[in-house]
Image (tube, rainbow, N blue to C red):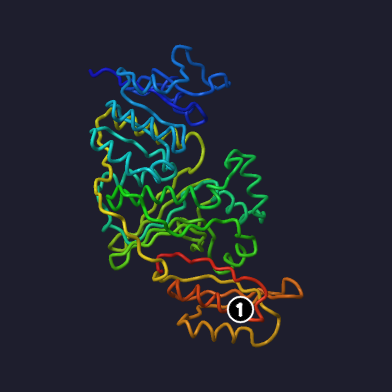
Amino acid sequence: MSPDKKVAVIGFGNIGVGVVRALYEKGVSGLRLVRVVDIDLKKKRPVKLPKEMLSSDWKTVVNDPDIDIIVELIGGIEPAKTIISRALRNGKDVVTANKKLLANEGKDVFTLAARRGRQLGFRASFVGCHSLIHEFQQAGNASKEFRRIYAILNGTSNYILSKMTSDDMTFKEALREAKEHGLAERDPSDDIDGIDTANKIRILLNLITNSYQKVPDFHIEGMRDINTQDIKYAGELGYAIKLVGAIEQENGSIFVGVHPALLPDDSLLGTLQGAYNGTELEDEYGVISGLVAPGAGVYPTTDAAVKDLVDIVEGRTMPLPTSSEPLILGSTETAERRYYLRFSVANQSGVLAQICNIFWKYNINIAGVIQKEPVNSKFVPLVMTTYEAKEKNILEAVQAVDELAVVKASTKLIRILSADT
């Protein structure tokens, strides 16, 4: 039998503790934890290790010829990039949960791993739906095998929106509860502003296009402005509001975005509650499939990292992007989809006619209109959904509508995503 592969974990925070417990306390066949590195070794942790296994110097571990695998769990760009790069150059395989690094510096890391013939496991960077990452890794270049991927990739944001929907909480109330349950960081900006979701979408794009080049910028919109008013109106229309990463293919172009969206409330993603992640994929034949998994917490990340470690031990290869071709995204201005619009208008006759006249000029067909009771004496909410329209036309039409004297506040626009759009 082959000797166990020796593993060093760099980063002894919550996720590091989870991986250490799996390797040291429970044990994983073929793997032996030999070192754990962290800058703070005095902090109390729920796992006890012999002092000789602990170190505050990652360089000695990365340069140790007896160590076979480095698990990087410190996050951020540096020194994580240097740690991973030096480990690969020293002939070690690497497992990482660092989505920020891979999304922004993936080109250097992917190409170095390929040149050195080393394994790079990164399912833990895509916690809630790492099975999707694995699926695309096994398929190789899968860019022609799907029409669209809609994904909820951040457990914190989905928890907040779920609470706003089910318990009629405000955004601030739901965010505070998420923090109390350990589902949101002290600074939750990456989660609620769509940055975390965007990083995962970039990693996924590298895989499905087989390109290791950095993904160009795309539209990223967070959820701070979503309120209970829009959640209620969306529910009346048969939709749920979620923060979604979208990848769509049409006529050879790839359209990408991260933004709040209305999803049918009986769809896989529309019914997804709590701190869960999910993906809905439609293939080239129109067949829709989905994946759901916990999207936040120590255990899901630990599980993904250990699965990568097991793959390395058992000799399963992890295909990485190999093409140097630049990734070109289509302009979202030309993408066609449906839209939800909430206007704040004066309570007087003729308002709807003025808005419809502008929409007619921009070739936008209205699917439905709901006039709500006045919120106050100054304005009335007017909710409208459209049939498919070009985003450029919608944005220009909304700008023109907002300039009308009868419009009392900026129009709220949310995209509608469903299988028929």
| Residue drawn at 66 percent across, 56 percent down | 168
Q: Which residue is mark 1?
A: 403
Where 121 sits versus 250, above or below? above
Q: Quadrant of residue 288?
A: bottom left
Question: Taking 384 as reference, is 348 left or right?
Answer: right
| Residue drawn at 72 percent across, 71 percent down | 375
* Local SS, label 1: loop
Question: Taking 116 as reference, is 330 left or right?
Answer: right
Question: Taking 162 as reference, is 199 left or right?
Answer: left
Where 101 sits versus 248, above or below? above
Q: Quadrant of residue 315?
A: top left
Question: Taking 20 as reference, is 223 left or right?
Answer: right
Task: Count up the numbered dots.
Answer: 1
Q: Position of residue 286 (x, y in %)?
A: 31, 63
Q: Position of residue 269 (x, y in %)?
A: 47, 56
Q: Quadrant of residue 99?
A: top left
| Residue drawn at 31 percent across, 46 percent down | 135
Q: Residues within 10 Å of mark 1 (few under 14, many from 20)?
A: few
Q: Residue furthest right?
A: 377
Front residue of this view, candidates 53 and 174: 53
| Residue drawn at 47 percent across, 52 percent down | 152
Where 42 sits versus 413, above or below? above
The quarter in which the N terminus is drawn is top left
Q: Position of residue 19 (x, y in %)?
A: 44, 28
Front residue of this view, candidates 340 and 263: 340
Q: Position of residue 256 (x, y in %)?
A: 40, 59
